[in-house]
């Protein structure tokens, strides 16, 4: 069994070890890594590299001069290192300490967040994911905590961090284990490793953590949402938390400069601008609808007649919203024996919208025609026989629409 040096000293950064076995990585295992270069699995008698487990990513670094791309445990529990070159004999290993320490901060902070979820909300954590952009825990909470509650949890955790409590990591005897205030039962029955922060948080864990809570730096809880029957809480710790908060602060400063607002007044000023924009959008929408309605008499008057005296109005407006187009079509088919094939550039800028309608005395299935006609534009739609709605990602040609309708009616020669 590989001796895990990080259990002896979590701060070890370099070490020397002997290669026990080295073999080409199987094609099945190699498929998870980018590139087609040969990769090797290297087993050592001892290692300071942490193998991916428990939601904590594997360590990276170098081994015998070769880059360590990944670290995993095999089916026997031994650790193998994925390298881009074969190794043998005695080798020197060096961890990517920036990566390792950041992962330690995330893992240490996660323990305290899980403690706070249990203490204040009665929830248990049963999953951890340490991602590049954010970290998450899955909990058995029945309801998503409010932002106010998440802030309370964040404050409680940072309070513990700033006390710089010692983090003790060890393998207790069976007798000692029975006396420990574990937050939850261990998932294994042998070689149980305990991580205890001060006299507050105590849990079984095989991962790597800082040696004091102060090394975590700070925690920011980003949010919470339901996920597959559980509540997922996202967070960042330490350097990653600082980078995220700095990026958000920079974005606020930039937005504030554009709105001539400070961070204290940014939300208020943003609401004012949005309210004004909504009001202007409403005025513009009403103006467009009025323009559509004013254009209807001329459209009807100039529309061609089919052999059965049906007026066929095929027209595309430059811009309209769906409600305006519906009102225009509804106004046109108040006239007897009228078919309206209307399209418009969506006022939201997302392709074209379409409304096809016919008066009650024209017995046609406009939904069926729309489905067939909009295929040419990569669009779709449908509805009742007398009134259909749809859209397309590209502009709809009214002349082509008129021709398609006549062909559909069997009028085209």
Image: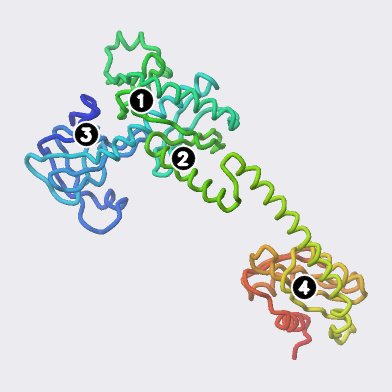
Quick one: SS at disc 4? Answer: strand
Residue 220 in percent (x, y) is at: 47, 34
Quick one: SS at disc 1? Answer: helix
Q: Is residue 372 above or below residue 410?
A: above
Whether tag 4 and tag 1 are in contact, CB under 8 A, the answer is: no
Q: Is residue 402 left or right of residue 226?
A: right
- Counting residues from the start of the chain, the first of labels 3 and 1 encountered is 3
Residue labelled with disc 1: 214
Quick one: SS at disc 3? Answer: loop
Instruction: Work out whether residue 55 or residue 319 is closer to the camera in this orientation and state it.
Output: 319
Give the quadrant of residue 63: top left
- Counting residues from the start of the chain, the first of labels 4 and 2 encountered is 2
Residue 228 in percent (x, y) is at: 54, 38
Give the quadrant of residue 82: top left
Q: Quadrant of the N terminus?
A: top left
Whether tag 3 and tag 1 are in contact, CB under 8 A, the answer is: no
Residue labelled with disc 4: 342
Q: Is residue 298 above or below residue 226?
A: below
Residue 51 in percent (x, y) is at: 27, 36
Residue labelled with disc 3: 78
Q: Is residue 219 left or right of residue 87?
A: right
At horizontal 82% and vertical 73% (from top left) the residue drawn is 364
Instruction: Work out whether residue 76 or residue 32 is closer to the camera in this orientation and state it.
Output: 32
Q: Quadrant of the C terminus?
A: bottom right
Q: CA distance from mark 4 to mark 3?
A: 69 Å
Residue 25 in percent (x, y) is at: 21, 49
- Counting residues from the start of the chain, the first of labels 1 and 2 encountered is 1
Q: Residues within 10 Å of mark 3 (few under 14, many from 20)?
A: some
């Amino acid at each position: 069994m590989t001796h895990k040096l990080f259990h002896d000293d979590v701060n070890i950064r370099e070490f020397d070890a002997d290669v026990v076995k080295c073999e080409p990585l199987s094609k099945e295992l190699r498929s998870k890594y980018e590139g087609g270069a040969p990769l090797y699995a290297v087993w050592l008698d001892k290692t300071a590299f942490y193998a991916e487990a428990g939601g904590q990513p594997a360590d990276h670094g170098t081994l015998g001069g070769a880059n360590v791309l990944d670290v995993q445990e095999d089916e026997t529990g031994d650790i193998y290192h994925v390298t881009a070159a074969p190794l043998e004999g005695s080798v020197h290993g060096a961890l990517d300490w920036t990566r390792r320490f950041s992962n330690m901060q995330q893992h240490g902070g996660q323990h305290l967040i899980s403690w706070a979820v249990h203490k204040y909300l009665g929830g248990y954590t049963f999953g951890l994911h340490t991602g590049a952009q954010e970290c998450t825990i899955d909990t058995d909470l029945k309801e998503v905590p409010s932002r106010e509650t998440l802030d309370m949890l964040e404050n409680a955790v940072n309070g513990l961090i700033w006390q710089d409590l010692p983090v003790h990591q060890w393998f207790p005897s069976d007798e000692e284990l029975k006396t420990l205030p574990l937050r939850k039962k261990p998932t294994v029955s042998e070689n149980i490793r305990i991580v205890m922060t001060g006299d507050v948080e105590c849990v079984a864990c095989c991962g790597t953590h800082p040696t004091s809570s102060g090394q975590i730096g700070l925690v920011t809880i980003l949010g919470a949402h339901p996920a597959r029957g559980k509540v997922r809480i996202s967070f960042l710790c330490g350097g990653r938390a600082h980078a995220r908060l700095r990026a958000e602060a920079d974005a606020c400063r930039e937005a504030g400069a554009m709105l001539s607002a400070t961070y204290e007044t940014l939300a208020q000023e943003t609401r004012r601008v949005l309210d004004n924009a909504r009001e202007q959008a409403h005025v513009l929408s009403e103006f467009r609808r009025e323009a559509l309605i004013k254009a209807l008499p001329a459209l009807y008057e100039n529309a061609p007649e089919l052999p059965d005296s049906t007026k066929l109005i095929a027209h595309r407006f430059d811009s309209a919203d769906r409600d305006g187009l519906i009102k225009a079509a509804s106004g046109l088919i108040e006239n007897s024996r009228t078919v309206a094939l209307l399209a418009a550039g969506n006022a939201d800028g997302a392709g074209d919208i379409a409304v096809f309608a016919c008066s009650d005395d024209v017995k046609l299935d406009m939904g069926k025609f729309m489905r067939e006609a909009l295929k040419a534009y990569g669009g779709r739609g449908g509805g009742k026989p007398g009134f259909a709605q749809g859209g397309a990602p590209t502009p709809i040609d009214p002349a082509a629409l008129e021709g398609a309708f006549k062909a559909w009616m069997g009028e085209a020669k």
